[in-house]
Amino acid sequence: MQLYLSKDRAISADMVRRIEDLGVQHLVLTVDTPVMPKRERGLRNRVSLPIQANAVPRLALQCITRPAWLYEYFVHGGMPLMKNWAPYAPEGASAAQVAAFYRSQSPCLQEWKDVEWLRERWPGKLVLKGIVHPAEAQRAQRIGVDGVILSNHGGKVLDAMPSPISVLPDVRRAVGPDFVVMVDSGIRRGSDVVVARALGADFVFVGRPALYAAVAGGASGARRMISILKQEIDITLALLGCSSLEDVTQDVLLPQSAKTPGRAAA
């Protein structure tokens, strides 16, 4: 379960209780969105809730020219209800009202004391998503967090953030070989997965490719995306002379000295 803390800590505490009652064993706390970012693509496309009046004609035209999508939207009840947030919204709230209530609670500012608060209440594995600095990973490790997901939120929150793959080696050195380090953002091909593994990642998440595949083809599209990535991983491993991801180490990468003109590879 991935959790965004709410401004009302009583809501977060109750969510944690519900998650535990359901038998969930791993909780992922996202910590890299303390405020709503400036998403320029959304601003250009006038995407917002509630919908702006000047965006209605364009949206109406898009809906009319996509009858299959429009049919599916209404057949499945229109705007989906955020059921995990519905118990905390006013009684009888519509899907739009529940979404508005969620936006009133999230994002919220978080500090390390909030991570400690959650660590005390959550008995299972706790993972922090959005860590990009080696010192932050070390601090999470000291608090008792079980792992981190290096992420810049796909570059859509703060575009000046470093790519997770660029900080992965430093984070791995900082926390040692036994602490779980995962990575997302920027993974587009199977070879990207292999490179992340070589740089020290225990696990790799895939965001946009999965999203686009699901939007384009539903469940079959998502399965096709997984099949393509698996095939690309297998091809990359074979070309590197590795029989599995477990065989991948940093040795498969070009040494830094070999990237500098005039110097021999180590």
Image (cartoon, helix red, strand yellow):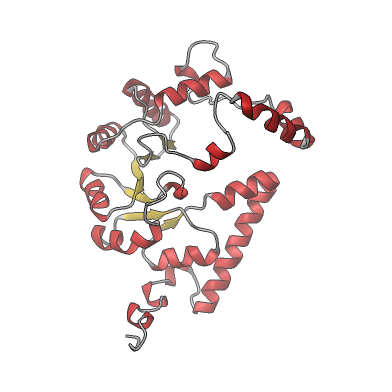
Q: Is residue 124 left or right of residue 61?
A: left
Q: Quadrant of the C terminus?
A: bottom left
Total numbered labels placed on residues in the image: 0
Q: What is the x, y in percent for residue 224?
A: 66, 55
Residue found at x 54% / y 14%: 93
Q: What is the x, y in percent for residue 158?
A: 40, 46
Task: Using the rendered view, name the quadrant where residue 169 is placed.
Answer: bottom left
Q: Is residue 177 visible?
A: no
Front in this rendered view, residue 231 or 155: 155
Front in this rendered view, residue 121 or 96: 96
Task: Using the rendered view, name the quadrant where residue 164 is placed.
Answer: bottom left
Q: Quadrant of the N terminus?
A: top left
Q: What is the x, y in percent for residue 90?
A: 48, 12
Front in this rendered view, residue 127 or 168: 168
Up-down: is 260 above or below 245?
A: below
Task: Using the rendered view, name the quadrant where residue 11 is placed.
Answer: top left
Front in this rendered view, residue 31 or 238: 31
Up-down: is 51 above or below 205?
A: above
Q: What is the x, y in percent for residue 23?
A: 43, 34
Q: Residue furthest front?
A: 54
Residue found at x 45% / y 26%: 103
Residue found at x 52% / y 49%: 207
Q: Is residue 156 left or right of residue 6?
A: right
Q: Is residue 187 visible?
A: yes
Q: Is residue 220 left or right of residue 2?
A: right
Up-down: is 135 above or below 89?
A: below
Residue found at x 45% / y 49%: 155
